[in-house]
Image (cartoon, helix red, strand yellow):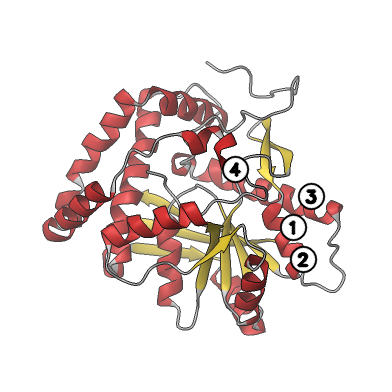
């Protein structure tokens, strides 16, 4: 099961992406069983199963383990020890488990701190909304919980139809509450729908760290080597003339989460450029923020794939070769 919701592509052909071809390990039946057990046993007792889940993936998912080891080597600046790899898998399992409670409105179970709340409130006060660009980093559900607790704050997610169906099926298995507000990409009407949400003062979330096929990307230095980042989200922000904020909800252990909102671009400003140079600068700013928070919360990275797979031939790798 993927750690976060929402993927993008700017051209058809998602099957071209290796991560998209990876079989989903979770199932709706398993999610329903986990939800039933978790809600009846309570969070503290049901968390005991997470140790076994993390151990299973540690032992029996060699490809994900290899890619996680490469990421950890880069972000930690040393060879990742087994305990480092296990901590990353446990954090992933914990955020999936906590979805059960967050989606069922059990916010009182969590100690949640926030950086950048004033930024969100200022965007709301201006009435124009903003694009929230996230990553497969930490828990998206805890950021949705923040939105639900703010009166009048609405967050829609922009993603492709196939992913929307998977996400809604997974969420329905966990909670009977209303489905996520999703804008389906891949249609001419998608940009109009996003524009309408922003005009109504809503926020629209996208993921900015993965591609699905041959969409335009920019290779940006990330943890010591060039990695491909899609241009689509920033191009959309430039077309819509709106602010762009980085968002993430980091798992700190136990019942603690830390939410971050940080502005990375503002295409709504009168003197802001919307050409390729401005878009490129916005992508680089996003990557810089992403890298900083990866180093701050290294075990919250849930991209269990070869993230640097598409770097240009012959590109220098400042971090050294893979183990």
Bin the neighbour count of mark 1 within 10 Å (Cα to Cα): few under 14, some 14-19, many 20 and up: some
Q: Quadrant of residue 119?
A: bottom right
Residue 102 vertical position relative to residue 10 in the rendered view, above or below: below
Q: Which residue is mark 1?
A: 235
Q: CA distance from mark 3 to mark 2?
A: 14 Å
Point out the frontmost of discs 3 and 1. 1
Bin the neighbour count of mark 3 within 10 Å (Cα to Cα): few under 14, some 14-19, many 20 and up: some
Point out the frontmost of discs 1 and 4. 4
Residue 201 vertical position relative to residue 100 in the rendered view, above or below: below
Q: Is residue 9 visible?
A: yes
Q: Residue at x 45, y 78 (%)?
A: 150
Q: Compare residues 261 and 219 and report the one nearer the observer.
A: 219
Residue 113 vertical position relative to residue 10 in the rendered view, above or below: below
Q: Which residue is mark 2?
A: 239
Decide which of tag 3 and tag 1 comes sooner along the chain: 1
| Percent position of residue 12, x then y | 63, 46
Q: CA distance from mark 1 to mark 4?
A: 16 Å
Q: Which residue is mark 4?
A: 212
User: Element at badge 4?
Assistant: loop
Q: CA distance from mark 3 to mark 1?
A: 9 Å
* Circles 1, 2 touching at the beta carbon (< 8 Å): yes
Q: Which residue is mark 3?
A: 280
User: Element at badge 1?
Assistant: helix
Decide which of tag 2 and tag 4 comes sooner along the chain: 4
| Percent position of residue 288, x then y | 67, 46
Bin the neighbour count of mark 4 within 10 Å (Cα to Cα): few under 14, some 14-19, many 20 and up: many
Residue 199 vertical position relative to residue 41 in the rendered view, above or below: below
Decide which of tag 3 and tag 2 comes sooner along the chain: 2
């Amino acid at each position: 099961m993927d750690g976060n919701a929402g993927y993008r592509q700017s051209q058809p052909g998602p099957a071209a992406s290796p991560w998209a071809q990876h079989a989903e390990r979770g199932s709706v039946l398993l999610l329903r069983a986990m939800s039933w057990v978790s809600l009846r046993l309570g969070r503290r007792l049901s968390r005991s199963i997470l140790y076994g889940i993390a151990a299973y993936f540690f032992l029996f998912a060699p490809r994900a383990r290899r890619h996680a080891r490469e990421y950890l080597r880069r972000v930690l600046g040393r060879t990742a020890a087994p305990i480092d790899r296990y901590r990353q898998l446990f954090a992933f399992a914990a955020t999936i488990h906590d979805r059960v409670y967050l989606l069922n409105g059990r916010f009182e179970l969590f100690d949640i701190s926030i950086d950048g709340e004033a930024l969100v409130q200022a965007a709301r006060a201006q009435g124009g909304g903003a694009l929230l660009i996230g990553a497969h980093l930490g828990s998206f559900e805890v950021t949705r919980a923040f939105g639900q607790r703010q009166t009048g704050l609405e967050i829609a997610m922009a993603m492709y139809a196939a992913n929307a169906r998977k996400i809604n099926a997974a969420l329905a298995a966990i909670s009977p509450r209303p489905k996520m507000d999703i804008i389906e990409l891949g249609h001419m009407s998608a940009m109009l729908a996003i524009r309408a949400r922003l005009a109504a003062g809503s926020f629209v979330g996208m993921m900015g760290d993965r591609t699905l096929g041959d969409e335009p990307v920019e290779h940006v230095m990330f943890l010591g080597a060039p990695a491909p980042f899609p241009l689509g989200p920033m191009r959309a922000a430039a077309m819509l003339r709106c602010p762009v904020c980085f968002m993430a909800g980091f798992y700190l252990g136990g019942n603690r989460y830390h939410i971050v909102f940080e502005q990375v671009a503002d295409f709504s400003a009168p003197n802001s450029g919307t050409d390729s140079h401005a878009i490129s600068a916005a992508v680089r700013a996003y990557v810089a923020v992403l890298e900083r928070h990866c180093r701050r919360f290294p075990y919250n990275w849930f991209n269990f794939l070869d993230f640097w797979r598409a770097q240009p031939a012959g590109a220098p790798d400042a971090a050294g070769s893979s183990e």
